[in-house]
């Protein structure tokens, strides 16, 4: 038993050592040296092409700040996708940002992101047919510009507290309808929820809901499903309402998170609102729009395929978590979820059945854990989990 605990401890430590992998890179585009940070998930070692999320920082911020404030790395390490955090250029008073003007002129950031996607597809196991874009504030506006100008490469977008350029509306002609998930706070004083005219300090910004409706455009969808997220952060003075549109003629889906009382930040670990873990919601949405990994079929043995057994491809969110964790598998039958601490000791065991379930881990201390999900038939899958309070 002691030997097993030591082995599990080694596996956990090895997994998390692999997970801490962010590299920096440079790319010359239009005579400019552009830089970025790339999160490489442990799943990259499988050799299987993985999805890519382009995550864009806000005005006067950086790739480092976007990596920290979005808390996307924990989701990428768990679910198995790449995240690239590019740096913008000096757009005003030497402050770093993005040129989201589709009319031309200035730094061509669309060309930069286009070249960056190609570069990562050539140098890493990035599946360039599964690329998504998200961003905060000015970066959110840039993600919209990418959805317009690179609709053949970007499968879906997720602007957060986005400063969306209304002048781009007549220039935005995606090749086809593209899914969007939008998050915006009603008390955002920097990028107002209701939009704002241009001033000597800031350019004009489009109203959040008006942009959402305009993006859907002529796509005919069923009536939106409105729901409220649990108010788990009672002291954040904000709540979240979600509108989901599906059964659309295009086959796409659209989601809008209205953060009532929300400020200009990314809801989640680093933001004001704690009811919504933005990065988890964004990945869940992207995954439903074609971002799911194909690792399940690629890693099954011939014997397992013949017997009908399947691996339990698992997602956990939120991650980091503070209490309850949602679990999603690819097995419809019974399963057990065993939680091990960093010393290889089993500290929780829960049984469930079906594609989704919840793990209640409020009794565990902050730290790194590993969740081993074992289906009734087939091999189990271990997923890292960070509990943070």
Image (cartoon, rainbow, N blue to C red):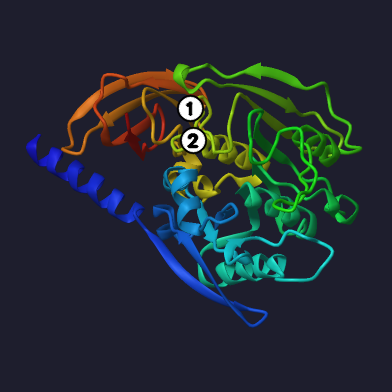
Task: Quarter of the image for the N terminus: give it.
Answer: top left
Which image quadrant for residue 241?
top right
Secondary structure of residue under mark 1: loop
Q: Is residue 131 above or below residue 363?
A: below
Residue at the extreme left:
2
Going by the image, does 142 lie left or right of 119? Answer: right
Q: Residues within 10 Å of mark 1 (few under 14, many from 20)?
A: many
Residue at the extreme front:
200
State the image coordinates of residue 388 (x, y, percent, origin top left): 32, 32
Residues at marks 1 and 2, CA–CA distance in whole angstroms:
7 Å
The answer to whether the residue labelled 1 contacts the one labelled 2, judged by CB atoms less than 8 Å apart, is: yes
Task: Quarter of the image for the C terminus: give it.
Answer: top left
Q: Would residue 79 be seen by someone viewing this image from the given angle? A: no
The structure residue drawn at horizontal position 52% and vertical position 54%, both measured from the top left corner, is 83
Q: Residues within 10 Å of mark 2 (few under 14, many from 20)?
A: some
| Label at residue 271 | 2
The structure residue drawn at horizontal position 25% and vertical position 52%, both measured from the top left corner, is 14
| Label at residue 274 | 1
Q: Would residue 40 be seen by someone viewing this image from the given angle? A: yes
State the image coordinates of residue 44 (x, y, percent, origin top left): 44, 58
Q: Is residue 231 above or below residue 154?
A: above
Q: Which sits in the foreground, 89 or 76?
A: 89
State the image coordinates of residue 342 (x, y, percent, origin top left): 20, 39
Q: Which sits in the foreground, 385 or 331?
A: 385
Secondary structure of residue under mark 2: loop
Which image quadrant for residue 290?
top right
| Label at residue 222 | none
Which image quadrant for residue 369?
top left
State the image coordinates of residue 259 (x, y, percent, origin top left): 62, 27
Going by the image, does 108 lie left or right of 233? Answer: right
Going by the image, does 339 lie left or right of 356? Answer: left
The structure residue drawn at horizontal position 46% and vertical position 32%, both measured from the top left corner, is 317
């Amino acid at each position: 038993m002691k030997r097993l605990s030591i082995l599990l401890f080694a596996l956990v430590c090895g997994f998390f050592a692999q997970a801490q992998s962010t590299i920096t890179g440079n790319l010359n585009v239009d005579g400019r040296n552009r830089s970025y940070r790339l999160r490489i998930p442990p799943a990259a070692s499988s050799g299987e092409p993985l999805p890519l999320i382009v995550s864009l920082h806000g005005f006067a911020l950086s790739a480092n700040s976007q990596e920290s404030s979005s808390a996307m790395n924990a989701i990428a390490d768990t679910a198995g996708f790449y995240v690239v955090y590019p740096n913008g250029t000096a757009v005003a008073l030497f402050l770093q940002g993005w040129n989201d003007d589709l009319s031309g002129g200035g730094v061509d950031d669309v060309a930069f992101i286009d070249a960056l996607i190609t570069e990562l597809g050539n140098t890493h196991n990035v599946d360039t047919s599964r690329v998504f874009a998200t961003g905060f504030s000015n970066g959110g506006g840039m993600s919209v510009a990418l959805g317009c100008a690179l609709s053949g490469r970007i499968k879906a977008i997720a602007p957060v507290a986005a400063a969306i350029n209304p002048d781009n509306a007549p220039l935005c002609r995606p090749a086809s309808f593209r899914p969007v998930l939008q998050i915006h706070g009603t008390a955002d004083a920097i990028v107002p929820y209701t939009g704002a005219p241009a001033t000597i300090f800031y350019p004009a910004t489009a109203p959040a809901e008006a942009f959402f409706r305009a993006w859907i455009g002529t796509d005919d969808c069923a009536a939106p499903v409105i729901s409220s997220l649990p108010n788990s952060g009672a002291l954040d003075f904000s709540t979240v309402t979600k509108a989901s549109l599906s059964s659309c003629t295009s086959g796409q889906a659209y989601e809008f998170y209205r953060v009532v009382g929300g400020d200009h930040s990314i809801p989640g670990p680093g933001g004001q609102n704690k009811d919504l873990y933005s990065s988890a919601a964004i990945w869940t949405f992207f995954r439903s729009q074609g971002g799911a990994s194909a690792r399940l079929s690629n890693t099954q043995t011939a014997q397992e395929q013949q017997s009908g057994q399947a691996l339990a491809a698992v997602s956990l969110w939120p991650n980091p978590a503070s209490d309850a964790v949602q679990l999603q598998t690819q097995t419809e039958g019974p399963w057990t979820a065993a939680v091990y601490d960093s010393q290889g000791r089993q500290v929780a065991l829960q049984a469930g059945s079906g594609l989704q379930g919840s793990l209640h881990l409020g009794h565990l201390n902050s730290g790194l854990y590993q969740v081993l999900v074992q289906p009734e038939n087939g091999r189990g899958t271990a997923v890292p989990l960070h509990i943070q309070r």
